[in-house]
Every structure is written in structure tokens, then in C-alpha cells.
Image: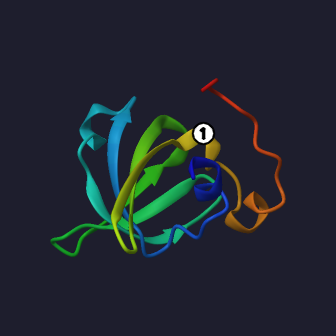
Amino acid sequence: MSQNILRHELIGLNLEVVKSTDSGLISTKGRVINETRNTLVLEKENGKEITLVKEISTFRIQFESENVVKIDIDGRLLVGRPEDRLKRKIKQLYSY
């Protein structure tokens, strides 16, 4: 499942920052409303938008289908244009 998320559309998903080199971003939650090569734009519950740098954070992404599924993804794996993630071979950062 974690490799499939790298090819999944992130816009519209709920996301939380669980780890970051910028400690002020940790626990930031919201819905992804835009994605660029290096950033994600979240709309927080209060309606404010915040731009997050992918490379410095680990994100907890929530999927809602039959069950609620939460997956932690290292932002370094998300760096790149969204349309190019489909074509890219996935470099394994961690051995499972």
C-alpha cells in the first residue's frame, strides 16, 4: 500500500505532519488543496492555507474507503511533479 500512495493523487486527502525539521509544523493538519514539485498546500480546519515543504517532513496521510487507513510517508519520496511520480521508479529508503 505504501508504494501505491506514491502514485496516488494527494489533492483532497487529509494529511498531518508527524515529523519535520521545522518543529513548528509538527501536528499541522488539513486537507491537501494543491501540490507542486516541492510543496503541498493544506487548508486547515480554520480555513487558512499553509504551504509545507515535502523534503523536510514526514506526513501521515488518511484514506477513507471502507475503513479509515493512515499511512506515514517520508516527504522525500513525494518530491517531484505529481504527474511524474507515476513514471518514476521507486527508490527504497527503508528495508522492510
Number of numbered labels in the structure image:
1
Closest to the observer: 18 or 79?
Answer: 18
Percent position of residue 48, x then y: 24, 70
Percent position of residue 52, x then y: 43, 52
CA neighbours of label 1 inside 10 A, class few (<14), some (14 to 19), many (20+): some
Q: Is residue 58 left or right of residue 36?
A: left
- Residue 9, relative to residue 19: is it above or below? below
- Residue 63, relative to residue 88: is it above or below? below
Percent position of residue 93, x then y: 66, 28
Residue closest to the far left: 46
Percent position of residue 66, x then y: 37, 74
Q: Residue at x 28, y 32 (%)?
A: 23
Local secondary structure at mark 1: helix
Residue closest to the far front: 66
Q: Quadrant of residue 30?
A: bottom left
Closest to the observer: 39 or 30?
Answer: 30
- Amino acid type shown at disc 1: Arg
Q: Residue at x 60, y 26 (%)?
A: 96
Q: Residue at x 44, y 39 (%)?
A: 58
> What colour scheme does the image use?
rainbow
Residue to which mark 1 is pinned = 76
- Residue 6, relative to residue 91: is it above or below? below
Q: Is residue 80 left or right of residue 5?
A: right
Q: Residue at x 57, y 48 (%)?
A: 2
Residue closest to the far top: 95
